[in-house]
Image (tube, rainbow, N blue to C red):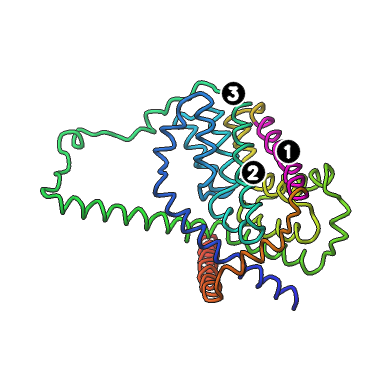
Amino acid sequence: MLLIENFIALFLESAPWLILGLTVAGIMKVLVPSQLMAKHLGKSGPMATVKAALFGAPLPLCSCGVIPAALGLRRSGASKAATTSFLISTPETGVDSVSISYAMLGPFMAIIRPIAAITSAITAGILVGTENSIPASASDQPAETCCASKTPEPEPCCSNEKAQIKQATTLNKLAEGLRFTYIDLVRDISLWLVIGLGFAALIKTFIPAEFLLQWGDGFMAFVVMALVGVPMYICATASTPIAAGLLFSGVSPGATLVFMLVGPATNIATMGLVKTELGNRTLAIYLASVVGVGFAFGYLTNYLAALWGMDFLAQAQHVHSMVSPTITYGTSILLAGLMVYGLMGKYLSHQQG
């Protein structure tokens, strides 16, 4: 009974902020189209690496969703460095995971998490080095037919009609972006989010703090969290409830951050893509950068937490008090409905397949 109560409490805590993150993510998908990314990341040089990290960090793509996006960038001419940077920053953080981090871990972890993710992405990209980009093949370019060149669409004759068409296009794009986050993204993360919340509830209910404290808050704790995180196929959003369970059961904030950085970025599918498309050397740099920068920020997090005497539980409770019960229950019902819809759709598609 206590396990169910803890699961429900964690779900209620995360729902308002997750819905907020999904909404912002949908808007950002409209504002940052893939063509714009390909244009900026196709150039070689350190600036493309930095841009790739900054472009990828807020995007609402999970561990599986980033693979086709990164592959598309690579095939569109992005360098190995830019592609590597994008592959790391995108799954490690995002507006949805930052919002749920703020809710469950407090403002400090919500700030340092994306900073660490962007730093690890830029580090990996710089180490990989800039290489000549691969030009897009003719089949990747939009076909230009004679009809398209000779018979353009007639332009609206008046400014009002132009404004109406522009407004309708913007609303359609916004609807597509929100549909992507509310339907497609929720479908992808629902199972892992349930697993994450369930794991956090199990930790909170059954595992005493003394058991987790035995690993300490230094190097060995970081190694254990990295070993746990590397094989896990989990997105940044779903890893956050697990991290909250670990943190509030005695794991140091630095070790918790290591888990949140390593887990989403190092699943088998992503490493396979890096090896196949970018080579063994890039894969080695990829793993070393994720783990190495994760450890460095883990030490920094522990140092700052001790220096400033942070109480992460109090921070999280303060965040929860900011949301009214009406909003909490309303967004929880909405999120539960979206998750059920997504899981049913995935189940039915597997049955038909």
Residue under pointer 1: 296
Which structural element holds mark 3? loop
Q: Determine crowd level at label 2: few under 14, some 14-19, many 20+ residues with C-alpha closer than 10 A.
A: many
Residue that appears at 83% across and 44% down: 218
Residue that appears at 68% across and 34% down: 289
The CA distance from mark 3 to mark 1 is 22 Å
Q: If you read the primary sequence from the N terminus, does the residue marked by circle 2 or circle 3 appear first? A: 3
Residue under pointer 3: 129
Residue that appears at 46% across and 59% down: 23
Q: Are marks 2 and 3 in contact (CB under 8 Å)?
A: no
Q: Which mark is residue 265?
A: 2
Q: If you read the primary sequence from the N terminus, does the residue marked by circle 1 or circle 2 appear first? A: 2
Three-letter code, disc 2: Ala
Q: Nearer the viewer, mark 1 or mark 2?
A: 1
Q: Determine crowd level at label 3: few under 14, some 14-19, many 20+ residues with C-alpha closer than 10 A.
A: some
| Direction from residue 168 to residue 268 in the image, left or right | right
Which structural element holds mark 2? helix
Q: Nearer the viewer, mark 3 or mark 1?
A: 1
Three-letter code, disc 3: Gly
Q: x, y percentage for residue 76?
A: 44, 32
Three-letter code, disc 1: Ala
**Residues drawn in magenta:** 283-306
The residue lying toward the viewer, choosing from 314 and 110, is 314
In the displayed structure, 333 sits above or below 118; it is below
Q: Main secondary structure of the magenta part?
A: helix
Q: If you read the primary sequence from the N terminus, does the residue marked by circle 3 or circle 1 appear first? A: 3
